[in-house]
Image (tube, rainbow, N blue to C red):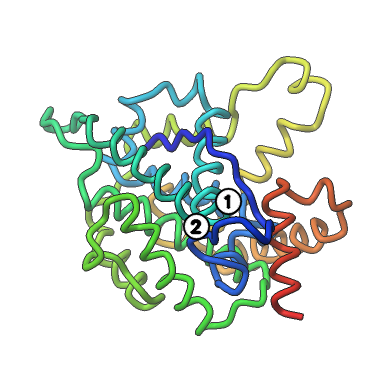
Amino acid sequence: MDTSSGADVRVGSASAEASLFGPDSITWRVHADPVFPIGGVRALIMQALHPLAVAGVAQQSSFEEDFWGRLDRTGRYVSTLTYSPASEARKLAARIRGIHRRLQGIDPRTGASFPIDRPDLLLWVHCCEVDSFLSTARRARAPIGPDDADAYVREQLLAAELVGIPSELVPTSVEELTRYFRGVRSELRLTDEARRGIRVLAFPPMPKKISLLTPARPAWAGLAGLALVLLPKWARRLYRLPGLPTTDLAATGALRAIRSGLFVLPDRLSGPPQVRAARAQIELQAG
C-alpha cells in the first residue's frame, strides 16, 4: 500500500507542535532503535503471506521498478507519524486514506474485486508492522520489558485508527496480537506474487556501478536474509524455511551483534536526522 509523503519531519524544536507520541513514549524508543530498518524489512516479508494484501500491492504498482521509492515512502510515512507535528501526521494519514479509498484489487483465485482499504487487510498490514518493529527491537536486546511491549502495542492503536482501521478490531496488548496472528493463519499462503516480491526484496534493482563496485548488494542480501529468519516459526514454515532452534539462536546473535556495531558508528552515520534528534530527546527525557 503506497505511503507517499513529501512532508518534512521536524523533531526537537521547543516551539514546534507536539507529535502524536513523544520522547517519553515506547513508540519513540522502538522506532528510534538502530535495528528498526531490519524490523521494517521483516514486516514487508511477513505482509506478503496474505494473498490479497500482496496481490493489491502487485496490481497497483510496479514493485520491482520502484522498489527503493516505495521503501523510502513507507519509511517517511512511519517517521512522519512518529516524529512530526501531529497536524502533519494527521494530514498525511488522511491523504493516504484518500488514495486507498479509490483503489480496487482483483483476487487472483476468484477474479472478484476487493477494496484496497478493506479493514481486515489494513489490520493485517498494521499488525505485521507492530509485531516486526517490536519483536526485532526486543530480540536485539533493546531495553523494552513486557509492560513496555504492551504499551507499544497499545500506543499503535492511534496509528491504526489514522489509517482507517476501526479501533475495536485492533490488538492493544502483546497477548491480543498473538491471538490475532493465530486466528488469521488459515488465510495465509505462499503465492506466486509473494515469491516474486521476496525475490525483488532480496535482489532489488541497483545501479550497475553500485552493484559492481561496492558491497551494497551482498550487504542488502544479508540484511534481507536476516529479516527472513527473524520471522516467527509459523511464517518461516509457510516460506518453506526450517524452524530449528539453532536458526533462532543464530539470527538473534547476528541481530544483537549488528545493534552493538551500529551504536559505535559516528553520529552522522547512525540514522536520519529526525531519528538522531529523537534519540537525543529520549536520552534527555530519561536523564
Amino acid at pointer 1: Ala
Q: Quadrant of residue 247?
A: bottom right
Mark 1, secondary structure of its residue: helix
Q: Which residue is mark 2?
A: 231
Nearest the viewer among 125 and 234 is: 125
Nearest the viewer among 34 and 53 is: 34
Q: Do the residues bearing badges 2 and 1 touch, measured as CB atoms within 8 Å?
A: yes
Residue 264, x across and y down, in percent:
87, 59
Residue 121, x across and y down, in percent:
26, 48
Image quarter of the N terminus: top left
Residue 250, x across and y down, in percent:
67, 63
Residue at the location (55% across, 42% down)?
A: 76
Residue at the location (55% across, 43% down)?
A: 75
Q: Which residue is mark 1?
A: 227
Residue 152, relative to residue 31: is it above or below? below
Locate residue 138 relative to residue 164 in the image: left or right: right
Disc sitting over residue 102 in the figure: none
Nearest the viewer among 14 and 264 is: 14
Q: Quadrant of residue 8?
A: top right
Image quarter of the C terminus: bottom right
Alpha carbon of mark 2 to alpha carbon of mark 1: how far? 7 Å
Residue 228, x across and y down, in percent:
54, 50
How busy is the neighbourhood of tag 2: few (under 14 within 10 Å), some, or many (20 plus)?
Answer: many
Residue at the location (55% across, 51% down)?
A: 84
Q: Quadrant of residue 127?
A: bottom left
